[in-house]
C-alpha cells in the first residue's frame, strides 16, 4: 500500500507522537520522529522523508518557521507537509497554508481521513 514511504513526524507531545507512529507503521509507512522544530528541520534536510506531519506549536522553532524554511529551499520544497495541530482557527489554517503547508488537519483528527490525505499527497508527489 505505502511501498515503505518515509514519514517524518515533528510533534512535541510524546503520547500523540507515539500514537501517530503506531497508526502510520500499522499502515506500512516508515516513521522517523522529532520532538522539536530544530531537530525536525535537521531531520527533514538529512533523512529524505517523503512527507512531513508537522505540529505548529513546537519548542525551539514553531511549525510555521519549519515549513517556511523547507518550502523556500529548492531542494526540499516538493516534500508535502501536513500541518497537524490543535489550533482550529481559520487564521491558523490560512497561516499554515501560506507558509507552505499542503494540508491542514486539526487534532483530534479522524484516523482514516488522515491516512487518505497522506495517500493522496504521496500519490500527487509521485506524479
Image (spheres, rainbow, N blue to C red):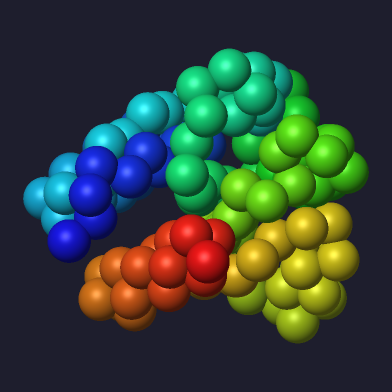
> Measuring 61% from the left and 48% from the top, which residue is drawn there?
79
Q: Position of residue 11 (x, y in %)?
A: 49, 38
Count up the numbered dots.
0
* Residue 83 seen in the figure: yes
Question: Is 123 positioned to the left or the right of 94 in the image?
Answer: left
> Measuring 75% from the left and 34% from the top, which residue is drawn there?
75
Question: Is 47 positioned to the left or the right of 7 in the image?
Answer: right
- Report which quarter residue 91 is drawn in: bottom right
Q: Position of residue 105 (x, y in %)?
A: 52, 70
Residue 1 to residue 35: above or below:
below
Q: Position of residue 12 (x, y in %)?
A: 50, 33
- Report which quarter residue 8 is drawn in: top left
Give 120 or 105, whichever is nearer the viewer: 120
Give 46 or 34, whichever is nearer the viewer: 46
> Measuring 43% from the left and 68% from the top, which residue is drawn there?
123
Give 26 or 85, whichever is nearer the viewer: 26
> Measuring 73% from the left and 73% from the top, which residue is drawn there?
93
Q: Position of residue 22 (x, y in %)?
A: 17, 44
Q: Residue furthest left?
A: 26
Question: Is 23 positioned to the left or the right of 109 in the image?
Answer: left
Quadrant in which the N terminus appears: bottom left
- Report which quarter residue 16 is drawn in: top left
Residue 65 to residue 27: above or below:
above
* Residue 17 seen in the figure: no
Amino acid at each position: 500500500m505505502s511501498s515503505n514511504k518515509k514519514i517524518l513526524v515533528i510533534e512535541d507531545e510524546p503520547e500523540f507522537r507515539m500514537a501517530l507512529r503506531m497508526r502510520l507503521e500499522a499502515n506500512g509507512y516508515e516513521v522517523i520522529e522529532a520532538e522539536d522544530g530544530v531537530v525536525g528541520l535537521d531531520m527533514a534536510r538529512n533523512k529524505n522523508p517523503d512527507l512531513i506531519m508537522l505540529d505548529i506549536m513546537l519548542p525551539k522553532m514553531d511549525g510555521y518557521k519549519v515549513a517556511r524554511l523547507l518550502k523556500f529551499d529548492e531542494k526540499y520544497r516538493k516534500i508535502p507537509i501536513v500541518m497537524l495541530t490543535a489550533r482550529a482557527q481559520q487564521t491558523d489554517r490560512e497561516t499554515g497554508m501560506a507558509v507552505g503547508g499542503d494540508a491542514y488537519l486539526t487534532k483530534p483528527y479522524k484516523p482514516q481521513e488522515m491516512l487518505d490525505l497522506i495517500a493522496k499527497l504521496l500519490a500527487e508527489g509521485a506524479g
